[in-house]
Amino acid sequence: MEIPRTSTTRNEGRGPGEGFRTFQTFARGWLEAHGDHTSAHDLSGYADAEAAGRLYTAWLEAGGHPMAVQQSVRRWLAGYGTTEVAGFVYKAWLNAGGRMSVVSPQVLDWIARHASSADHVLVAYLDRGGPFPLVRDAALTCMTRLRESADGSFVSKALAKRASLSDEVVLAILAWCRHFAHEGDALWRLSQLGEKLARPGVAEEACAVAELLLEPWLDPQSSPDRDVANNAAHVLAFLGSIHDPRLRARAYALLLRWLRHPNTFSRSTFCRRPLVPRLLTHVGVLLECGAIDLTADGAALARFEQWAVRCDPETMRPFAPLQEWFRRRVLP
């Protein structure tokens, strides 16, 4: 099978185009003809051509084994590892499970040089377990640029769970959630921010975004599905830990409305174990201050008890029956 030829001009090396599709067709054809995803001897002679980056990208994305082109990719990166087209090679290599050592430290240099457009490589790098501190600045640049872009979904997903995010990155993720409030991913992303929602520097915006995202589901006639119910429970647990009394009052107001909704805790099937007793504590505060009435809100409290036992039966065992615990919270 003959290797397709293409121009090596810089303009053609910027990203997928007709030349890339030609290479991808070739790579798939090779795999179909040989049934061998682990050898690609005919590709090794092209490591000195810049356009070969698209060939290696096509090979990897078509399912070719990284080991088949490992030495060629290593050699190619030595000459073209900082070019824009190298971004597609890094992404394809990492997504295909190629060894991190083959692209390090060049991939970090590339992300730093192309921080304003490095989101696809950044996500691949983080998904493969690359150390976040080494790309912290690029992460802020990417998330800030994409906070009103649909592409920000991938970056925010890769970043949200990380404990060491700066307030600036958290605010950029919150901005993305606000801009895409109608998307189901927004509430999930908010829940993944976890304890970071209660930080003093982001708590007010976190409350505002939570109010925006939950408002459509706070109508008693609404019917949130399991995922919405699960994600909302996590968000409310974290927001209730805000230190600012004014903002915590807003968080508790959301929890109170969520508690009284007939289809929220009754639909939720999962909550991370440490958060179940935290939500129980928040409900206890609402009982103590008189916001919840044992009689008028009896059905709501029963639904909450069933949810708590369902999600964390071991932790809830010492509190059983919860109705007695509720009563003790309101005794003078």
Image: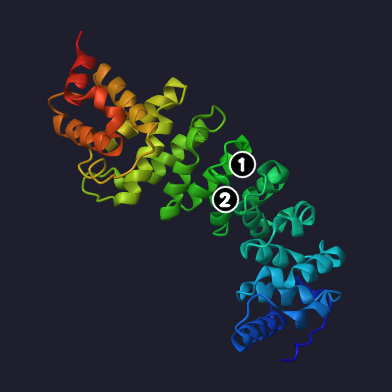
- Residues 230 and 96: in front is 96
Q: Quadrant of residue 98?
A: bottom right
Q: Mark 1 = which residue?
A: 169
Note whether residue 259 is visible.
no
Residue underneath mark 2: 158
Amino acid type, callout 1 = Val
Nearer to us in this view, 70 or 134: 70
Q: How is the image coloured?
A: rainbow
Q: Tell me how far mark 2 sits from mark 1, CA to CA.
A: 12 Å
Q: Amino acid at mark 2?
A: Ala
Q: Secondary structure at mark 1?
A: helix
Above or below: residue 320 compared with residue 89: above
Q: Quick one: quadrant of the N terminus?
A: bottom right
Left or right of 131 on screen, residue 327: left
Q: How many marks?
A: 2
When the figure is inspected, residue 17 is found, relative to residue 154, above or below; the finding is below
**Circle nearer the N terminus (2, 1):** 2
